Image (spheres, grey):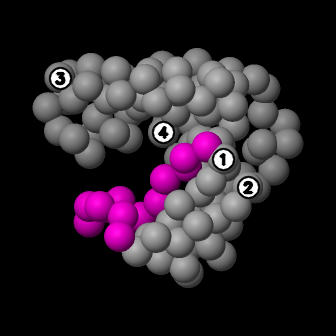
Amino acid sequence: MPVVVNKYLIGRHFVGIALWPFIVVKDSFLKHDESFINHERIHLRQQAELLVLPFYLIYLIEYVLRLIIYRNSQQAYRNISFEREAYENEENLEYLKKRRPWSFIKYL
């Protein structure tokens, strides 16, 4: 899982993204943030389970639906099932060792 630094990531709140098979970060210090990297690794596992492209499609659909529900982009983002799983487990550095396939479903 290579971590790539790209200081040109768009958006104030956008500091990193998992783009199979890479983790792209805005600042190099994030490469050493274990919780942040674990969060992105959880997304890589989710992407692998869904064979990558369906992950992005479901992510986008879920974001739009939650945006309609919450009428707030940050709240919509934080309630995407993939994000809920990643945020809830980012501090647990052992999570991916015991995580069952398709675990994001329980966060829908």
Pointer 1 or 4: first along the chain: 1
Residue 96, horizontal then vertical, whole percent? 78, 42
Q: Give residue 106's quadrant in the image.
A: top right
Please state which amino acid type lies under the numbered disc 1. Pro
Is 65 on the left or on the right of 1, as rendered? left
Q: Nearer the viewer, mark 4 or mark 2?
A: 2
Residue under the point 76% across and 44% down: 95
Image quarter in which the N terminus is found: bottom right
Which stretch did the figure color magenta? 8-20
Mark 2 crowdedness (10 Å alpha carbons): few <14, some 14-19, many ≥20: few
Please state which amino acid type lies under the numbered disc 3. Ile
Mark 3 crowdedness (10 Å alpha carbons): few <14, some 14-19, many ≥20: few
Residue 12, horizontal then vertical, whole percent? 26, 66
* Residue position marked by numbered label 3 in the rendering: 68
* Residue position marked by numbered label 1 in the rendering: 21
Pointer 2 or 1: first along the chain: 2
Distance (Cα) linking label 1 and label 4? 18 Å
